[in-house]
Image (cartoon, coloured by chain):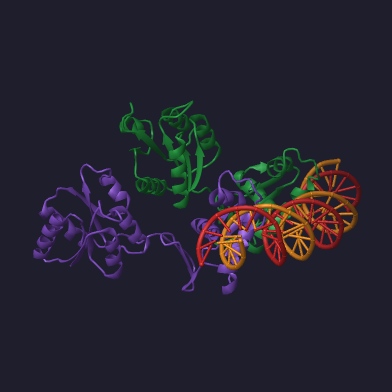
Chain colours: A green, B purple, C orange, D red
Amino acid sequence: MRVLMVEDELRLADTVHRGLTDAGFVVELVHDGENAVWAATEHNYDVIVLDIMLPKLNGYRVLELLRARGIWTPVLMLTAKDGEYDQTDAFDLGADDYLTKPFSFLVLVARLRALIRRGGPERPVVLTAGDLTLDVARRRVERDGREITLTPREYGLLEFLMRHRGDTVSKTEILAGVWDPAFDGDPNVVEVYVRYLRKKIDTPYARHAIETIRGMGYRLNPEGG
Amino acid sequence: MRVLMVEDELRLADTVHRGLTDAGFVVELVHDGENAVWAATEHNYDVIVLDIMLPKLNGYRVLELLRARGIWTPVLMLTAKDGEYDQTDAFDLGADDYLTKPFSFLVLVARLRALIRRGGPERPVVLTAGDLTLDVARRRVERDGREITLTPREYGLLEFLMRHRGDTVSKTEILAGVWDPAFDGDPNVVEVYVRYLRKKIDTPYARHAIETIRGMGYRLNPEGG
DNA sequence: GGAAGCTCTCAGCGGACTCTCAGTGCACAG
DNA sequence: CTGTGCACTGAGAGTCCGCTGAGAGCTTCC
């Protein structure tokens, strides 16, 4: 469980950092708004603890910027009891929870756990072609309910074909998409890997999902062949 | 119906004790947190009434300790209106109900009856993969009914793999999730710790729960290998 | 202050994977 | 029917990746 903590009071930040680490969180600590936005954009956290009073960008601006960038990591805001802002503002701006300073450490942990629990996992992207399925998140390929193990290159090729299923893709496109845009080796690798793939996903099932379009390239049959 | 009552204000404790007894409950009364934990561990109660302000261990610590020990007796917390905690916190921390002092005795009895009727809260998260189990709350790992002792790092790695069981996770993801998002050392640590883990959870049982997906990462077999 | 345990680094090894190459087979056009 | 060119195939070389054992720093606990 990864937490981004944005807090400029060093003593508080240090205490909480240590405590959360002991509680089993992996904590990243930044001390101002700009770094907060940068960190949250670059990495994926399960939850963000965001102080309001911060150097450079205050907490509200940070929250606004993140949401504007499409980053929807749950945010728990820390508000000072005597501050000019209150809880209502925090909720209006898209915070998922708030806590008034001073706060109990136990409560903080409990709230973070609740926030993380609440935020369900993203729905998985599963590509299908007939009875052939490829689960992008799990990097799993199945046909007929049985798992098929592929090497990285084979997997990359199959994912590319599945993403373009129904379309005829040229070997050059495949090389650019699966190998490297700057690849300058023998285009025959594609043929070789198509063969490897066929051996694993077609031959054992007496199907031909991968069709050869002579002179053009290959095409993955959307019905699975 | 057996009630454990944890309350250090003697007058209040005595009054409630008498009242609950009259209402048909069997009441055990303790006056501080340590005795509360001890009593709740030793005996089985149908419900626990827990004050927050307590000598030695406060109510929240008591609750945390009990849940950590796998004791899931329903808990009703007593909160003072002016305290630093409020009802929301009580729920977040795992209490099943709360009451703000001063409270009506009739309401207390009604709530207790409701709690007992409702039964205990759901069991904690126990992750399983075949006969391999990991109890998150207790930080315990078992295989085949026997406990396996792990170092903190090993435990962290296993919990991560169990939370993503069935998914292939890359070494980078593992480093970010188990080590630190900013970790910049040798990714070989992951391999080394996978080995340590295998030595403890797989080799002695002639299994292979942790699978290597070459070029991609690792995957914990949901069936335990 | 020493022992034990934990974390992490390092370097060598073996095998899996990638890619090349040369020869074969097959489709299509003339 | 025949030739051309594209795709297919099997073998093999080189590279990269993960595994492993040893050990050096650190911390913790006597």
Q: Is residue D1 left or right of residue A36?
A: right
Q: A144 or B177: nearer the eye? A: B177
> With respect to residue A76, does A136 lie above or below?
below
**Would residue B75 be visible to someone looking at this image?**
yes
Number of labels in the image equals 0
Q: Position of residue B61 (x, y in %)?
A: 33, 55
Question: What is the quadrant of the N terminus of chain B in the image?
Answer: bottom left
The residue lying toward the viewer, choosing from B198 and A209, is B198
Q: Is residue B208 left or right of residue B33?
A: right
| Residue B218 lies in quadrant | bottom right
Q: Quadrant of the C terminus of chain B?
A: bottom right
Identify the residue at horizontal 13%, vertical 61% (top origin). Answer: B17
| Residue A143 visible at all | no
Q: Position of residue B118 (x, y in %)?
A: 23, 60
Write down the quadrant of residue B47 in the picture.
bottom left
Q: Residue at x 74, y 48 (%)?
A: A190
Q: Is residue A34 above or below residue B187?
A: above
Between D13 and A216, which is closer to the camera in this rendering?
D13
> Measured from the top left, where is residue B98 in percent x and y?
22, 51
Q: Is residue A157 above or below residue B214?
A: above
Residue B158 position in % (x across, y down): 53, 60
> Closer to the camera, C20 or B51?
B51
